């Protein structure tokens, strides 16, 4: 039986190759995501491993390590220099080096452009020759000399290579300090660590005193102390020794702990990317299951006589089942292997793409045993599960079928079961969605999500039933438009609704996701538009493209532009409120309400230090009323704040906690602006105000001035960029679906060889034959698209409703886009038919008609 | 007999037609220079033992297969000069087919199957002629049925009706009764006979059944790729007798 299986497998290479391709794509995605993120992890482990000295002393911040780093603000709490001396004097300490560090000091290249990758920090440090925990220097001079006085800088070699500067040139910087533009003479080039890779960041090195002037207002203080342990004292002992003498607002950690913390914070930041890829791998596999299921179903149907012959010759039902499953196992194994190889290619490609954006990942790819195991388990398991149903069906072929001419293998009972299960799942899912939307459950979004998944599978099972009426509409006009060719195409599409539906289901899934995502995206854009239309009265907005905060000096300069009436600054920070990490906004509510929509429903907008505002909904859900207090922890403070007022829900503020800027400053959060609203004076000429603003910010490439329209546009761009990325990835699911259509058509054409021969004999031209197949393909594709868009509409609208309160208030259905999707599906149908149609047209008439 | 034996119009003819399969060692001569004419309005049967080339002759005549050398004419059209597109059109407009089995498109009704060549060509159906054909085949009440709802004999009669309805120059029938029981076979054969007598249709039929050949006006005997004999006004007995002779020759060789 095994030999027979292998032989029949070899005889169907092409068809199996196509179903194997689905596995290859799915597995490639899984393997690619793992390999890529492992490579990222390794890179960051390399960069941060062995970066710190034995022990690090730093201000003690509330919340997790990256809470404040996320806003690139850090803290203004510094370490006085006498504390460095005290630490150095401890018996277990060989040396203690005070470090000055700033994360928002960006190098401009000779063209005046910011050199770091979007979102990556511009790091500035003071130079000291203390070693890392391994006893090696962190920075090595590769050219020129180290900075020894004010106005001198050394750059890291990667930045230097791309900058266009020569040693001796004046390097331009943008800082968040009082002087937004700084320049310094380039005196040397240093190499960071072994590889020199900073993952997209830049590194500028200054002499200590000068660094203190630049970043600490000249105060003789530091942001951190690097401690080298004396003799054979362990880092842990030294840490404990230091901790015992540290004032309360500082902490001592071993360098290894700090390195791990830093690396994992960054990996977590990129972790979403991994999740993202894995989600699409799951979708690819899910769609692939349909393709595999369909291919095996058709193959089994075509082989039913062969199966029956085996049965007649005495093979047991089990043996037949096992033979199909063995086939699936082999296909899965081969597919997984190829998928793994392709996955490595995908990871290499992603690495190259990241490199092109300046985020170079040093070293080769990382292939962990886990990746290999998961790839094979997923690939083989999925294939075998998909083949199980056809395998069972195959075993039911009665031996007598071998003697009969045509065999109907599709058993009525399994069809009925799938209808019941499909209907049940659909109803269950719809119920869950309704409950999530209209009922009062805690996690509405989760409920809706689970409901959507159930409906998805349910409808896929119901598809054979749904297909018939939809096809009658989709292909109903074929005969009147294309005559006999159209009638043949329509009847062929309707001939085996189960097969057509399974083929269309793959496309349906892709289309439903694309539709749902496009509705969510359009709603997000519409929400932003409305928020800005209704909520923003300021004529101009000054911000940073990636949300990096900037110096308050910018606001001051802008305030002096002719025709500017008022500049309202908005600052943002993380904070720990009643134990939860929370996003804080800080502004003067009175000024803010002139620039944007802010309406108090209770309390006062006279917001003093130690007070806060909160949105209506949040106040209600937390049970807060004016006068209540919450505990707010900031880097430099830990105090109760009092609710001064409750504001009407507005999409711009998302109902969050608003404090005064003084509160942030008191909490040692650096005073940096995230957003400026610029209100023009009455009667001022907006064009000339604009020109003035542009001029005032001309030498600050990190800051952009936008009018309302541009600001909307750029918000929309951000949403759209994400959408396009999602579309690109969903394109993969669609590609698999296309393969499914190609596969089904090719197999159908093979099944109908004699029919094709007859049609050609009685005068159907090759072109007409191709058109017949093309029309059938379009019918399948449009069926998938129509079902998909319908489901996607349901899902998209439900999702929007479910998260309406979390900032997606406006529902927008991009009708034109949905029509485009359906039209695209028709084009997909045409493309999918190219190869099967050519194959069919090439069939020799005489041979086709005499085929047995 | 409705046709004039003297100078009848020729519906199709082959001149020195050869067909050779394979080459060198595997070379098989299926047709070794056959010259033959098929008179219009006549019912010709081609007989011969298996491997005699009778099917090949029909396939080449019917533009389903290309010849190695020699000419085939349908009416006045020389097939050797035609490309695939022209051959397709020729089959559609000038030739009717009845195959041994699988003559119908399973997704189309009997009526749609019958008008298929006309529909493909985009021609309108001559209603009177259609009704006439249907009446002759006796399928009036079965027109809306799909092929799988028809018996084998009915399916073959639908196929005959399809061949007739476009009024082709010539109909080629390849063992049309090969898959039928004798009663259904008789129905189909008498129908073909009637279409020659009543409509003046030209029919060329390949068969190995002497009873079927007896329905024809003229029988051609093929052996080893050559026409070795012909017989006018055949009867089953005479044909059988002649065939026995071939078997003997075949055995001697």
Image (spheres, rainbow, N blue to C red):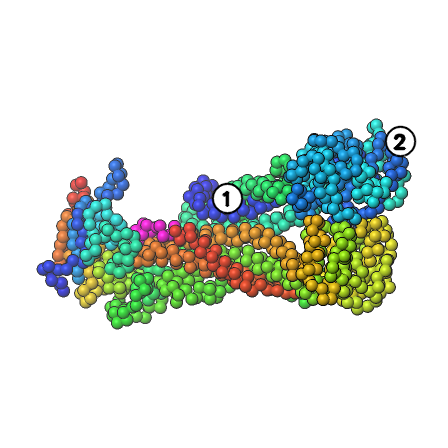
In the displayed structure image, the side of residue A726 where residue A641 appears, left or right = right
**Is A730 within the magenta?**
no
Residue placed furthest toward the left: B6
Q: Which residue is drawn at 49% across and 48% down?
A: A19
Instruction: Tell me residue A261's x, y (percent).
Output: 75, 42
Residue placed furthest toward the top: A231
- The numbered mark 2 sits on a residue in which chain? A
How far apart are the two marked residues, 1 and 2, measured between alpha carbons? Answer: 67 Å
User: Badge 2 is on which residue?
Assistant: A91
Q: Residue at x 16, y 45 (%)?
A: B248
Question: Is the residue marked by circle 1 packed among few (<14), some (14-19), or many (20+) residues within 10 Å?
Answer: many
Which residue is at the front of the view, A279 or A646?
A646
Badge 1 element: helix
Badge 2 element: loop
**Is A841 within the magenta?**
yes
Q: Quadrant of residue B231?
A: bottom left
User: Badge 1 is on which residue?
Assistant: A331
Q: What stretch is highlighted in magenta?
A: A839-849
Which residue is at the front of the view, A738 or A815?
A815
Q: Are marks 1 and 2 on the same chain?
A: yes
- The numbered mark 1 sits on a residue in which chain? A
Instruction: Tell me residue A313's x, y (percent).
Output: 41, 46
**Do we see residue A499 in this rendering?**
no
In the displayed structure image, the side of residue A317 where residue B189 appears, left or right = left
Q: Main secondary structure of the magenta part?
A: helix
Question: Is the residue marked by circle 2 packed among few (<14), some (14-19), or many (20+) residues within 10 Å?
Answer: few
């Amino acid at each position: 039986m095994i030999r027979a299986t292998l032989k029949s497998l070899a005889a169907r290479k092409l068809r199996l190759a196509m179903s194997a391709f689905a596995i290859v794509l799915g597995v490639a995605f899984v393997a690619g995501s793992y390999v890529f993120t492992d490579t990222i992890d390794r890179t960051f482990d390399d960069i941060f491993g062995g970066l710190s000295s034995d022990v690090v002393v730093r201000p003690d911040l509330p919340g997790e390590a990256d809470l404040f780093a996320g806003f690139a603000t850090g803290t203004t709490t510094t370490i006085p220099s006498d504390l460095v001396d005290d630490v150095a004097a401890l018996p277990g300490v060989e040396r203690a080096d005070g470090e000055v560090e700033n994360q928002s000091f960006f190098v401009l290249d000779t063209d005046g452009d910011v050199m770091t990758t979007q979102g990556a920090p511009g790091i500035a440090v003071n130079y000291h020759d203390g070693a890392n925990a391994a006893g090696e220097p962190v920075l090595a001079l590769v050219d020129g000399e180290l900075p020894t006085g004010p106005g001198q800088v050394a750059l890291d070699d990667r930045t230097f290579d791309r900058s266009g500067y020569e040693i001796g040139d004046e390097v331009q910087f943008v800082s968040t300090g009082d002087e937004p533009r700084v320049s310094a003479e380039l005196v040397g080039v240093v190499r960071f660590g072994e590889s020199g890779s900073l993952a997209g960041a830049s590194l500028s090195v200054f002499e200590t005193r000068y660094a203190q002037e630049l970043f600490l207002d000249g105060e003789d203080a530091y942001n951190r102390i690097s401690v080298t342990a004396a003799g054979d004292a362990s880092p842990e002992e030294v840490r404990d020794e230091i901790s015992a003498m540290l004032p309360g607002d500082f902490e001592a950690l071993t360098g290894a702990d700090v390195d791990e913390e830093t690396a994992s914070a960054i990996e977590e930041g990129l972790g979403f990317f991994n999740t993202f890829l894995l989600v699409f791998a799951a979708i690819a596999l899910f769609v692939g299951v349909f393709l595999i299921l369909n291919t095996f179903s058709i193959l089994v149907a075509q082989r039913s006589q062969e199966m029956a012959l085996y049965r007649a010759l005495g093979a047991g039902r089990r043996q037949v089942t096992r033979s199909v499953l063995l086939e699936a196992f082999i296909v899965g194994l081969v597919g997984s292997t190829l998928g793994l190889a392709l996955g490595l290619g995908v990871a290499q490609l992603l690495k190259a793409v990241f490199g092109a954006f300046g985020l170079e990942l040093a070293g080769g790819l990382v292939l962990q045993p886990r990746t290999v195991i998961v790839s094979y388990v997923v690939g083989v398991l999925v294939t075998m599960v998909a083949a199980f149903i056809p395998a069972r069906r195959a075993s039911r072929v009665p031996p007598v079928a071998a003697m009969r001419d045509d065999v109907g293998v599709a058993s009525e009972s399994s069809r009925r079961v799938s209808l019941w299960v499909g209907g049940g799942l659909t109803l269950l899912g719809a119920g869950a969605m309704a409950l999530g939307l209209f009922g009062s459950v805690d996690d509405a979004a989760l409920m809706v999500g689970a409901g959507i998944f159930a409906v998805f599978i349910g409808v896929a099972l119901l598809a054979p039933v749904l297909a018939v009426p939809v096809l009658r509409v989709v292909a109903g006009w074929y005969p009147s438009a294309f005559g006999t060719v159209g009638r043949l195409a329509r009847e062929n599409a309707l001939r085996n609704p189960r097969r057509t539906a399974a083929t269309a289901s793959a496309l349906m899934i892709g289309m439903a996701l694309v539709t749902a995502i496009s509705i969510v995206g359009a709603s997000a854009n519409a929400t932003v538009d409305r928020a800005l239309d209704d909520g923003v009265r300021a004529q101009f907005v000054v911000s940073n493209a990636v949300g990096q905060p900037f110096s308050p000096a910018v606001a001051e300069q802008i305030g002096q532009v002719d025709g500017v009436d008022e500049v309202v600054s908005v600052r943002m920070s993380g904070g720990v409120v009643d134990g939860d990490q929370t996003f804080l906004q800080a502004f003067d509510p009175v000024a803010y309400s002139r620039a944007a929509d802010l309406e108090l429903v209770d309390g006062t907008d006279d917001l003093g230090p130690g007070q806060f505002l909160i949105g209506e909904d949040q106040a209600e859900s937390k049970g807060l009323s004016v006068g209540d207090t919450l505990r707010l922890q900031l880097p430099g403070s830990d105090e109760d704040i009092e609710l001064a007022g409750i504001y009407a829900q507005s999409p711009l503020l998302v109902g969050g906690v608003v404090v005064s800027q003084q509160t942030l400053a008191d909490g040692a959060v650096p005073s940096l602006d995230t957003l400026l609203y610029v209100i023009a004076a009455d009667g001022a000429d907006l064009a000339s105000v604009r020109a003035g603003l542009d001029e005032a910010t001309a030498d600050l490439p990190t800051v952009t001035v936008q009018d309302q329209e541009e600001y909307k546009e750029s918000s929309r761009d951000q949403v759209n960029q994400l959408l396009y990325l999602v579309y690109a990835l969903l394109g993969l699911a669609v590609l698999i679906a296309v393969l499914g259509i190609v596969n089904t058509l090719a197999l159908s054409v093979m099944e109908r060889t004699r029919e094709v021969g007859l049609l050609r004999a009685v005068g159907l031209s090759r072109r007409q034959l191709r058109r017949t197949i093309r029309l059938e393909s379009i019918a399948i594709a449009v069926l998938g698209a129509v079902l998909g868009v319908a489901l996607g509409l349901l899902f998209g609208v439900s999702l929007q409703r479910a998260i309406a309160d979390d900032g997606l208030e406006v529902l927008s259905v991009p009708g034109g886009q949905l029509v485009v999707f359906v039209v695209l599906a028709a084009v997909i149908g045409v493309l999918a038919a190219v190869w099967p149609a050519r194959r069919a047209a090439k069939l020799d008439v005489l041979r086709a008609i005499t085929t047995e | 007999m409705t046709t004039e034996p003297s100078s009848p119009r020729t519906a199709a003819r082959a001149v020195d037609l050869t067909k050779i399969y394979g080459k060198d060692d595997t070379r098989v001569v299926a047709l070794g220079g056959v010259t033959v004419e098929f008179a219009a309005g006549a019912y010709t049967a081609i007989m011969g033992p298996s491997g005699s080339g009778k099917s090949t002759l029909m396939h080449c005549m019917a533009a389903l297969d290309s010849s190695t050398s020699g000419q085939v004419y349908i009416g006045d059209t020389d097939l050797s000069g035609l490309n695939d597109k022209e051959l397709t059109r020729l089959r559609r407009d000038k030739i009717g087919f009845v195959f041994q089995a699988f003559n119908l498109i399973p997704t189309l009704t009997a009526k749609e199957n019958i008008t298929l060549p006309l529909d493909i060509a985009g021609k309108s159906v001559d209603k009177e002629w259609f009704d006439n054909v249907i009446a002759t085949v006796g399928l009036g009440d079965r027109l809306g049925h799909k092929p799988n709802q028809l018996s084998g004999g009915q399916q073959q009669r639908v196929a005959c009706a399809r061949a007739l309805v476009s009024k082709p120059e010539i109909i080629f029938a390849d063992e049309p009764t090969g898959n039928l029981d004798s009663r259904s076979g008789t129905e189909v054969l008498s129908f073909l006979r009637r279409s020659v007598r009543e409509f003046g249709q030209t029919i060329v039929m390949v068969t190995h059944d002497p009873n079927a050949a007896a329905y024809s006006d003229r029988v051609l005997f093929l052996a080893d790729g050559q026409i070795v004999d012909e017989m006018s006004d055949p009867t089953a007995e005479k044909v059988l007798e002649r065939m026995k002779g071939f078997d003997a020759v075949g055995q001697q060789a």
